[in-house]
Amino acid sequence: MSKNFFEVKNVDFKVGGKTKVANVSFAIENEGDIICLLGPSGIGKTTILRTIAGLEKIERGTIELKGNVLSSNQINVEPENRNISLAFQENSLFPHYTVEKNILLGADRNKDKKDKNVNFQEIIDLLDISLILNKFPHEISAGEAQRASLARSLITNPDLLLLDEPLSNVDQSFKEEIQEKLKKILKSSKITTIIVTHDSYEAFYLGSKCGIILNQELKQFDDPYNVYHLPNSIEVVNFLNRGILIPAEVTSPKSLENKDLGTITGNFNKPFPIGSKVKLLVQPEDLHHDDQSNLKFEVIDRKFRGTNFIYTLKTPSNLLIPVFVHSHHIHQHEENEKFGIKRPIHIDHIVCF
């Protein structure tokens, strides 16, 4: 019997006999934990949720919740007996019921539960849907329908809540506020949750663990900090799109050399023999601006991101390197200007492949 609250072990997730994600294993250690699954559209994230909910069967591996096997090649507990709630990305409201009636259907499922306390009004306020409670699904927007579906799932007090892109139709101006409140209510109510999203910032904020699904595999399952700063493969680096891989040579246990940047020091995430030719991950926050530096590169692009600029610099070897600069910096460099990089260059986490 597993000691984890929820566990997937060696499962092939399939639809119509076709494997979407193969040989998947991950666990949720404690009740009330939130994990996020990240990946591009169509990669199989929704299939994983549908299978966990019991809507798809498995032929290999096991899915366990609270020490009980829900799915295996011999066992398939019916969806209604799993106490798992799945909120789909698309509108799943009953069209002949008002929004309020739709939500209360979830409350009716769990009216006898005493161990968790999710308040109806608290959820309505959280998702800002009080003004649409008396409306029917065809009278509300896609974003409002998505929030109503989320409310219905929250109020069921499930052992496991599955959310498929829960905020994809929510206005950006409202999204961060909902993320904050959603995390608070999930934690305070100890609702164990798996969230599927394509938004890495959302996953890093909400999840205590993040899984990256690419090319039919769970490539990495780790703390958000490690997924970002210590990606375990080039595929994960490319998916997150938060930096560039540049050629370098390992010159000591704590340094390497690049033709354009020169000597770079730091702590390697794994050892490499001296003389190894590697690809070094350089993320925008790894390099620091210095107008007085003699190491200068040409600015070819500048993106304003509110609190910062992201400059793209072109090196003599035609590498395109991104660099963060605080937006309050006095000198805002224009395209074709020279941009100084502070020396010596030190990167806390040296990630190489």
Image: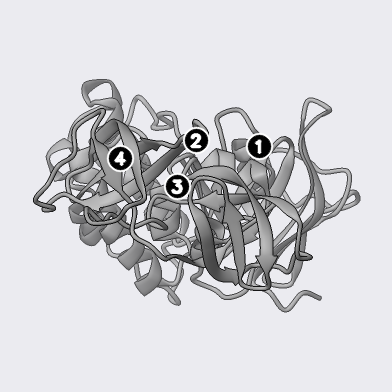
Badge 4 is on which residue? 311
- What's the CA distance linking mark 1 and mark 3? 19 Å
Q: Is residue 52 above or below residue 209?
A: above
Mark 1 residue type: Thr
Mark 4 residue type: Tyr
Give the percent coordinates (x, y) of residue 163.
Answer: 48, 47
Q: Which badge, 2 or 3, is on the more N-terminal residue?
A: 3
Residue at 39% over, 42% down: 322
Q: Secondary structure at mark 1?
A: helix
**Toward which corner of the image does residue 118 lie, by quadrant?**
bottom left
Q: Secondary structure at mark 2?
A: loop
Badge 1 is on which residue? 47
> How many residues crowd around disc 2 within 10 Å: few (fewer than 14), some, or many (20 or more)?
some
> How many residues crowd around disc 3 within 10 Å: few (fewer than 14), some, or many (20 or more)?
some
Q: Secondary structure at mark 4?
A: strand
Residue reaching furthest to the top:
138
**Toward which corner of the image does residue 115 lie, by quadrant?**
bottom left
**In screen coordinates, is 192 left or right of 29?**
left
Q: Which badge, 2 or 4, is on the more N-terminal residue?
A: 4
Mark nearer the viewer, 2 or 1: 2
**Toward which corner of the image does residue 174 lie, by quadrant?**
top left
Badge 2 is on which residue? 319
- Asked if residue 35 shows in the view, the reply is no
Give the percent coordinates (x, y) of residue 152.
Answer: 37, 47
Mark 3 residue type: Ser
State yes or no: discs 2 and 3 in contact (Cβ < 8 Å): no
Badge 3 is on which residue? 200
- What's the CA distance linking mark 2 and mark 1? 39 Å
